[in-house]
Every structure is written in C-alpha cells, then in structure tokens.
Image (cartoon, rainbow, N blue to C red):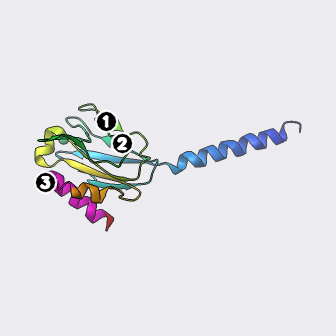
Amino acid sequence: MKYGKSLIAATLTAATLMSTSVMAENHTVTAQVTAFKPMVIKVQPGDTVSFENMNGHIANTKFVQADGEHEYIPEGATGWTSQMGENFTTPELTKEGVYLYKCDPHWGAGMGGVIIVGEPTNLEAIKATKPKGALKRLVKKAEKAVK
Ligand SMILES: [Cu+2]
C-alpha cells in the first residue's frame, strides 16, 4: 500500500478540479431568421455564451453611430466581433454587467441581444446614453429582465 495515499490525494485533486470547472457554465443562443433566441440571457461571472446556427449572422458588441463606435459592456470588459456566418463562443465573461450585441446585416430588423452577467452594474450608465431605436428596445428588454 505504498502508493495508496498518493492515489487518494490524486483522486481528490482531480475531483476538486472537476467541481471548479463544472461551476462555470456554457449557455447557448441560437440565431433564428432575424432574432437571437433567447434575446436576453442571464449568466454568472466566468460563464461563456455560444452562438449557434450563425449562418448569415454575426454577433458584434461594436455599435457604429453618428458620433463613432460604441460598446455597451461593463467597464474593463472585452467585447467581441464574431466571424460572419460562423458559430462563436465568447471568452469567459468575468466582468459583471450588461453586454449588448447585434447582428450587423439584420440590425435594421432589430436583431440584437443582451447578456447579463451577475449584477447589471452598467445598466444605468447605458440608459444615460439615451439609446434610440433598436438599441433602446434592447435596453428595455435588459431592464425588464433585471426587475
Ligand atoms: Cu442576423
């Protein structure tokens, strides 16, 4: 029984590692015609979101407006622009707050979505920018989801 103890230690280490990785979840958003389903998704810090059925779509946190490019994501967070037509998984969403994204070719039809990571820390700041049109609708959906 010389290696009995080290075997137990190795098993415990493996179990600990597994339980840590189980805590971070992956969530799925599916592109359907001109909508992301679900349009609003609530996740926990460290989780990831995968976009599926992305043929003809893109998930982009960069919004180009008259006064330049904007991102509506928490302070210090990193946004993303997926490859057109390809399924995509976000990096680990470690910063709490609201992340808005859209599909560029279908943004005119309002194809956008909201990811809320933990507490909506930046929602008031986003509202303060006085969003209009489809962006305003996204913000309203986010507000409704956190009520
Ligand atoms: Cu689209």
User: Which quarter of the frame holds ligand 1?
Assistant: top left
* Sequence-first tag of 2 and 3: 2
Label 3 crowd (10 A; few <14 / some 14-19 / many >=20): few
Query: For numbered disc 1, what is the local secondary structure?
Result: loop
Q: Is residue 83 left or right of residue 77?
A: left
**Residue 77's quadrant in the figure?**
top left
Q: In this figure, which residue is indicated by the disc labeled 1?
A: 87
Q: Are marks 2 and 1 in contact (CB under 8 Å)?
A: yes
- Residue farthest bottom in this picture: 147
Quarter the C terminus occupies = bottom left
Q: Main secondary structure of the magenta part?
A: helix
In this picture, which residue range is highlighted in magenta?
A: 129-145
Q: Nearer the viewer, residue 81 or 70?
A: 70
Label 1 crowd (10 A; few <14 / some 14-19 / many >=20): some
* Sequence-first tag of 3 and 1: 1
Amino acid type assigned to the residue bearing label 1 in the image: Asn
| Picture disc at residue 132 | 3
* Sequence-first tag of 2 and 1: 2
Mark pair 2, 3: CA separation: 27 Å
Give the residue drawn at x 31%, y 37%.
Answer: 80
Mark pair 3, 1: CA separation: 28 Å
Q: Is residue 135 left or right of residue 71?
A: left
Query: For numbered disc 2, what is the local secondary structure?
Result: strand
Q: In this figure, which residue is indicated by the disc labeled 2?
A: 50
Residue 25: x percent and y percent?
Answer: 46, 49
Amino acid type assigned to the residue bearing label 2 in the image: Ser
Residue 69: x percent and y percent?
Answer: 20, 39
Give the residue drawn at x 41%, y 48%.
Answer: 95
Give the residue drawn at x 24%, y 44%.
Answer: 31
Q: Are marks 2 and 3 in contact (CB under 8 Å)?
A: no
Mark pair 2, 1: CA separation: 7 Å
